Amino acid sequence: MTLHSQTTDTEKANPAETQAHEPGNDAVQPAAGPTEGPPAPQGARRRGRGGWRFYTASAVVCLLIIGLTWHFARFTESVVGAVARPEARADGVVVLTGGAERVQRAVGLLAEGRGRRLLISGVHPGTTRKQIISLTSADQKLFDCCVDLDRIALNTEGNAVETAQWVRDNSYSSLLVVTSAYHLPRAQLELREMLPDVELIPYPVFAQDLDLKRWYMHGVTIKLLLREYVKYTVARIRIAFRTVF
């Protein structure tokens, strides 16, 4: 009884071994196929996914930097290559304040008969007409007759709003736009949004103390162009967003 009990316990403990030694059990066992390796640790899988995301994000950032650099180069090219047409004429002339040279040139265009009236947009509330006449050496009669002052606009967007109202009030279909060369792209962008049916004729003014031809050699000029490029880009996004929504 004791021996039988021990044999049974052995068979129960290792049935495969018992079956292999049973008489008549001579069937060939199938060869074991290739076994799969152990699964990759969870941490390794996370590192793999994280690496893929890092490289993707890096590629996107690089493409974005390349695109912005190319667009900035195009922007500076348009600024440096801006040319004032000597024969340019229009119904009206508008100058966006920001420098005495801008206003002086605009008054000169009016005196040459390039437009019927002149709007000086963005005049400081404390600046008088006499001060502007003195600054520009303008003819008193011409100034009193044909120059309008906008004291409401505080920025380029405001310039465009007030200029559009002035153009509509005078029923003009063409406009000479006088401002600094680096400011001209943004000024035209804002004015085109407000006056889609009016012909805008750019008239860039180049400050004597600003070397735009060799802008890359002067830190002050680089900063000026970068700042203006950012403002221009923001204005484009704002106008595009307004158009869509």
Image (cartoon, rainbow, N blue to C red):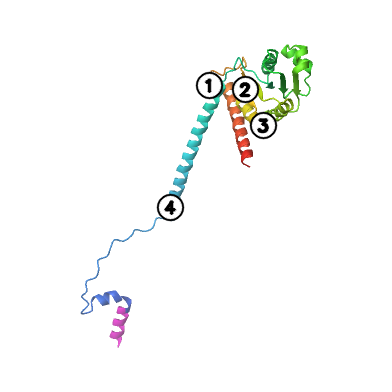
Tag 3–tag 1 contact (CB < 8 Å): no
- Residue type highlighted by circle 4: Arg
Residue to which mark 1 is pinned: 216
Q: Position of residue 35 (x, y in %)?
A: 31, 61
Question: How many discs mark residues in the rendered view?
Answer: 4
Residue to which mark 2 is pinned: 201
* In the rendered image, the vertical position of residue 83 relative to residue 163, given as above or below: above
Q: Earlier in the sequence, mark 3 or mark 1?
A: 3
- Residue type highlighted by circle 2: Ile
Residue to which mark 3 is pinned: 194
* In the rendered image, the vertical position of residue 72 relative to residue 9, given as above or below: above
Q: Residue at x 27, y 74 (%)?
A: 17
How would you rate the neighbour count of disc 3 (Cα within 10 Å): few for under 14, some for 14-19, many for 20 or more? Answer: some
For residue 143, what is the image quadrant?
Answer: top right
Tag 4–tag 2 contact (CB < 8 Å): no
Kindly give the residue lying farthest to the bottom in the view shown.
Answer: 1
Q: Secondary structure at mark 3?
A: helix
Q: Is residue 126 left or right of residue 230?
A: right
Q: Secondary structure at mark 2?
A: strand
State the extent of the magenta-drawn residues as a range.
1-11
Q: Position of residue 139 (x, y in %)?
A: 75, 11
Q: Residue 45's mark?
A: 4
- Residue type highlighted by circle 1: Tyr
Q: Alpha carbon of mark 4 to alpha carbon of mark 2: how far?
A: 61 Å
Q: Position of residue 153 (x, y in %)?
A: 73, 28
Task: Identify the main secondary structure in magenta.
Answer: helix
Q: Earlier in the sequence, mark 4 or mark 1?
A: 4
Q: Alpha carbon of mark 3 to alpha carbon of mark 1: how far?
A: 33 Å
Q: Earlier in the sequence, mark 2 or mark 1?
A: 2
